[in-house]
Amino acid sequence: MKVVNLMNFVRRIDERFENSTEQLLSFTTEQLRLVNEYNVDNTFLLQYDAVCDEDFVNLFKNEATSRTELGLWYEIVEPLTSACGIPYDSKKGWKWDWHIIPGFSMAYSPKERELLIDEAMRKFKEVFGYYPKTVASWVIDTHTLNYLSKHYDVCAVAICRDQANTDAYTLLGGYFNQAYYPSVNNIFTPAQSKEMQTDIPVFRLLGPCPIHNYDNHKYSSDAFRATNRRAPCTLEPIWYMGNNKEAVEWMFDCYYEEESLGFSYSQIGQENSFFGGKEKIFNGLRMQIEMLLGQKKDVTFQKMCDTGATFKNRYPALTPATSLIAPNNFDDADVQSIYYDCKNYMANLFRFEDKVFFRSLFLFDERVKDQYMENTCTTFDAVYENLPIVDTMTCPAQDRKQSGLMIHTGTTSLAASKATEGVLNVQLGEKAVTFYEDRIEIVTDRLVWYKNATKASVALDDGGLSFTYKGHTYRLDVVGAVAKESSGNIEFSATGDMIVLYPKKV
């Protein structure tokens, strides 16, 4: 299953610019004509104000073909709150505002969220004759997701990639790319059981770079940092990586040519508020589409709703294990990156020059509630995160070679392959790491846990490491090793051929 969603996001107004509605409509028109030209399945997600605008509606009614799905882009705008009798608290007096307050669902009470999504769905059906099958936004709260699941036949939901302190939201330690079934308690956390699961798959947007997305160019060359200027490392054609042929070709190879454990996925496209970079966007998007059609003929362009339905048909029970692998780097820096995601945890195994370590490792716990489930967000930003075991981005080391959870090995290359269903094996020269859904087996004689590995409180005990983070307790059981502390670091020495890690709930 190799899928790409060509998906564009449509706003009617952006008050950062003069005459924005005219420019947004013009740009959206060109986006639609571009996908019509290539005659591939695609999705346009319309914000409420665009659904209410006759010119935007007529554009899609008159020019969209059967290859285009129309869905809902769910940022909260003043016309929507006004229709529900709810104030729109924009500090700038705007009708669309990119801040969490008032632009996203967690800024409202649970009852208000129900009124807002009901009105958005009602208006969409009034205009187009059916309810949207796809609903997406940069962030959506869990109460809204559960309400959609209960009252509407939605096939797919999508939220932003992982990012920290970007715009007005942080998403950290989630299922890295493909898709997952979320917990009824938290849209950002895969469920571990059918009983606690919302059966709408949640997809991750924007095509994040498997090397540079996590920690913003920390392991890139000076030349790359100078060229990229710390722009987001995604497939968005407005940014350097999404517009650079070499980088895009490398990204597509990572997504579609390397081991994915059965489901390879990316999302391409652009929100229409970047109309100022029109030439760059259209050149980049054409290049991406033609590269996929010409070089990746086994990759299927799908509507987002069809991808959701296909996912549910292929994985009817629980979230599958998937991987995303960067076996090399288009940049000069000597790095490799391997992501493994499953219903229980996500892990990023990373090689920088001659050092191999876990750059991130987060536990998923379906019991942990979205902090905005019953409460409104009252802060500038909204934060969604899972339980950190290793998180070298928010706890950076001074020495990039002494970071996270280090594996004692002198290898200069990682090689990943599927072992069995849901199991990924990574060879580290004579050593190895094998990811199972309940554990990580490491053939090595030593691991070193660096004191800067996580922002959680950590304690060493006879069974491994215990963690406390924001009132939640959890563990990393370490089997087959003896431990000792040294200068705040913890060294695990193997008692046999293998050390086994069990990320565990308590």
Image: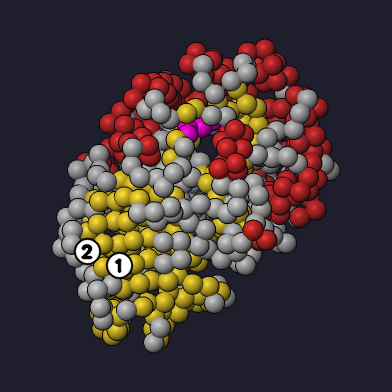
Among numbered discs 2 and 1, the one appearing first in the sequence: 2
Left or right placement of residue 380 versus residue 240 in this view: right
Quadrant location, the C terminus: bottom right
Count of numbered badges drawn on the protein: 2
Residue in the foreground of this view, choosing between 199 and 202: 199
Tell which residue pokes out farthest to the front in this image.
Answer: 420
Helix, strand or loop at mark 2: strand
Identify whether 265 is placed above or below 335. Answer: above
Q: CA distance from mark 2 to mark 1?
A: 8 Å
- Residue 374 in sight from this viewpoint: yes
- Residue 26 sits in which quadrant? top right
The location of residue 478, given as percent across then percent down, is 37, 77
Q: Is residue 72 visible?
A: no
Residue extending furthest toward the right: 85
The magenta segment: 3-7
- The structure residue drawn at horizontal position 52% and vertical position 58%, both measured from the top left corner, is 343
Q: Are marks 2 and 1 in contact (CB under 8 Å)?
A: yes
Q: Which mark is residue 138?
A: none
Residue 112, placed above or below residue 77:
below
Q: What kind of residue is marked 1?
A: Ile
Residue that badge 2 annotates: 431
In the picture, measured across the screen, residue 400 lies left or right of residue 106, that is left
**Can you identify the residue that label 1 sits on?**
442
Number of residues whose C-alpha sits closer than 10 Å to that of mark 1, classed few (under 14), some (14–19) or many (20 or more): many
Coloring basis for residues: secondary structure
Q: Is residue 315 left or right of residue 54?
A: left
> Residue 327 location in percent, x, y?
27, 46
Q: What's under tag 2, amino acid-wise?
A: Lys
Residue, x 31% and y 73% (percent of image)? Answer: 499
